[in-house]
Image (tube, rainbow, N blue to C red):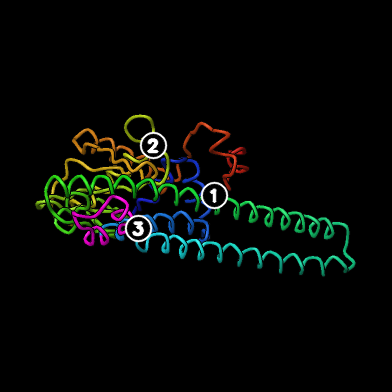
Amino acid sequence: MLSISTIKTYMFCPLKLYFQSEIDEIYDEEEYFVPKTLKDLRIDIQDLLHKNLRLVKKDMELKEIEETLSKGVFNQIETTFEIIEELNETKKEKERREKSSIYKDSNIEFLDEDRQILNASLEDNDGTLEDLDNEEDEIKKLKDEIIDEVNLNLKILSLKASQAMKNLEKDGNEIQNLFFQSSMYNTLIRDLGIDLIGVIDKIEVEKGKYFPILLKTSNPPSKGVWQSDEIELIANALLVEGEFNTYITVGFVEYLKIGERRPIVIDTFARKKFFKLLTKINKIVEDGEIPHVKTSVKKCRNCEYRELCEKA
């Protein structure tokens, strides 16, 4: 059974999927911990904003509305980044212990060949510690970006809520559905019919209709959505259709950084394109077919399979 994560890997690089399938490497979950945690944080923030909107009253001033909406939001950000920073510090401490152990070994007499291996281990460890220091700087940068993003979204939501309450003469609990739909988050769905499994970021339900929402923390293109996001959303739509016995004609990619939602039509053409792509993926995963890809300095620079790729 294929997973949506397999499709995402293919869309990033078919050859990377080939190496994953053939080498069958067990990946370190820590590699994906930060992006997954940040996505969960953004979902938690949306839930807090939804909850806080119910406390807003139509006679409040704009500043008071913003303060009410922000309750608990920045504490949630602090708590989340404390966890991320603690994990990074734990990794650094582990590398320091390993480095200390290697230095102890360096006092032992070795054959020249073994000495070369030991020196290489020391160099690798120095590089890992440097990477973790850089990661610490990156974590601080991410935290600042999210705080700026939240501050902007708070001001926008405060202004929209204030205008809606004045125009409709209703409190926040009466207008919440204008801004937050009834939703399901992180829903795991398995469909034996199309042999596919995946976690759907968000499913909104309105008047009996289901709308799959793909949450992305990356920057969007100037128009439309990235092709990889479109394919992932189509996969989400097909899983939702099977799970809830419905038919989906449109879904959305929500680019969280800019707070913008972009629609994707799930028509016959989109479905045919998706299943054609599934055939290509199965040829790699099941038949071991080696795909031809165009390399890119930006995309390939940090790939763990770069050396294998150059020899392929």
Sequence-first tag of 3 and 2? 3
| Residue that numbered label 2 is attached to | 220
Q: Residues within 10 Å of mark 3 (few under 14, many from 20)?
A: many
Location of residue 42 (image quadrant):
bottom left
- Residue type pointed to by label 2: Pro
Q: Residues within 10 Å of mark 2 (few under 14, many from 20)?
A: some
User: Magenta segment range?
Assistant: 51-69
Q: In which quadrant is the C terminus drawn?
A: top right
Closer to the observer: label 1 or label 3? 3
**At which x and y percent is residue 147?**
45, 52
Which residue appears at 41% of the width and 63% of the height? Answer: 76
Which residue appears at 18% of the width and 46% of the height? Answer: 164
Which of the numbered marks, if any, corresponds to residue 141? 1
Closer to the observer: label 2 or label 1? 1
Evaluate if marks 1 and 3 touch, with contact meaning CB atoms under 8 Å apart: no
**At which x and y percent is residue 232?**
33, 44
